């Protein structure tokens, strides 16, 4: 999961989106699936000048797996329209095994009916993540969390609800997951004792971020073998691209350096499948490089520049927590 800027300003005047809004305003109930292509364009919107990235196929915002086909164009309501359920028994058992305890959850509550036709509540999701057995209607809040009032819209600038699930369109959640070389996905923050205390104080602690990451991995089923295999392949390709960039830098071949840098850039760019795996491989490589060695320092700086470029292109404005 990498950050998806939503609603992207460059897509705000899209004709399909505007027609959908007009139909809603006219009292109709437009099909949210009609916004699939518009949603699918959001990861690409940050990279309009790259002919490869601007032509990438739509991908799930949660798993980063390609999605498409007649029966797989799921548009997920992030806040469920009918019921906000606690974790299922299976999900609770899996989380208990990871953490050694269960986080405090609010009771099951009525859904966000007023957000059913609100596009800001939509996310693009792989069917394996969206349907029964995975996220479906599960939407656990911390037991002390307030709730949005009827007609109120979620706002990243001002947190109202304390939602356990990670949201790919929330910039505060973009750095909580990490991919390992075998393709498995884990929390970036280390585990800790169960956080106790004032909700506003404990929410952004490493221990709580660890809880939210594990809970999201379990509910979204991000550890599915298909996702692991896809991430492992991208991680390996990224390692190979880093090796090619090292050799190009060592040979002082400017043309090869540019080619290797572009290959590496595209692997980790937002529209690419399993971009988090590529970025995790880059970050892991940086940690092994010796800053005192001129070649390794140059390689490290080149990789850091790419990681910074992603952040600048995808999230140019800093949104406070």
Image: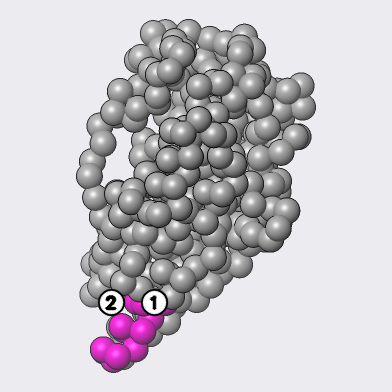
Residue under numbered circle 2: 295
Q: Residue at label 1?
A: 51
Q: Give the magenta-colored segment's residue range.
A: 252-263
Residue drawn at x 69%, y 47% is 127
User: Which of pointers 2 and 1 lies earlier in the amino acid sequence?
Assistant: 1
Q: Is residue 138 left or right of residue 253?
A: right
* Residue 130 sits above or below residue 268 on the image: above
In depth, the one of 303 and 163 nearer the eye is 163
Colouring: one colour
- Count up the numbered dots: 2
Residue 224: image x %, image y %? 70, 48
Vertical position of residue 315 compared to residue 192: above or below? below
Q: Is residue 44 magenta?
A: no
**Above or below, comparing residue 129 to residue 259 in the picture:** above
* Mark 2 element type: helix
Look at the image and say whether residue 262 sits in the magenta stretch: yes
Question: Which residue is located at x 59 percent, y 27 percent?
Answer: 80
Vertical arrangement, residue 65 with respect to residue 194, above or below: below
């Amino acid at each position: 999961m990498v950050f998806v800027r939503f609603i992207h300003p460059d897509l705000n005047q899209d004709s399909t989106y505007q027609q959908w809004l007009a139909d809603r305003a006219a009292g109709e109930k437009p099909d949210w699936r009609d916004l699939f292509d518009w949603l699918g364009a959001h990861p690409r919107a940050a990279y309009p000048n790259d002919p490869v990235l601007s032509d990438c196929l739509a991908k799930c915002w949660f798993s980063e797996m390609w999605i498409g086909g007649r029966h797989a164009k799921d548009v997920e309501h992030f806040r469920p329209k009918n019921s906000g359920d606690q974790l299922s028994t299976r999900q609770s058992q899996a989380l208990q095994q990871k953490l050694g305890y269960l986080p405090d959850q609010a009771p099951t509550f009525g859904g966000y009916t007023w957000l059913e036709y609100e596009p800001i509540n939509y996310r693009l999701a792989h069917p394996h993540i969206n349907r029964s057995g995975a996220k479906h209607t599960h939407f656990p809040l911390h037991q002390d969390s307030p709730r949005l009032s009827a007609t109120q819209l979620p706002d990243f600038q001002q947190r109202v609800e304390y939602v356990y699930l990670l949201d790919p369109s929330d910039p505060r959640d973009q750095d909580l997951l990490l991919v390992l070389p075998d393709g498995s996905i884990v929390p970036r923050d280390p585990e800790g004792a169960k956080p106790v205390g004032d909700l506003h104080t404990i929410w952004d602690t490493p221990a709580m971020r660890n809880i939210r990451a594990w809970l999201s991995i379990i509910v979204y089923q991000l550890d599915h073998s298909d996702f692991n295999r896809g991430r492992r392949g991208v991680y390996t390709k990224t390692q190979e691209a880093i090796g090619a960039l090292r050799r190009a830098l060592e040979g002082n071949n400017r043309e090869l350096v540019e080619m290797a840098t572009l290959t590496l850039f595209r692997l980790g760019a937002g529209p690419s499948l399993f971009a988090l795996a590529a970025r995790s491989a880059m970050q892991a490589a940086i940690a092994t490089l010796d800053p005192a060695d001129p070649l390794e320092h140059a390689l490290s700086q080149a990789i850091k520049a790419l990681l910074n470029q992603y952040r600048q292109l995808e999230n140019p404005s800093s949104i406070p927590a």
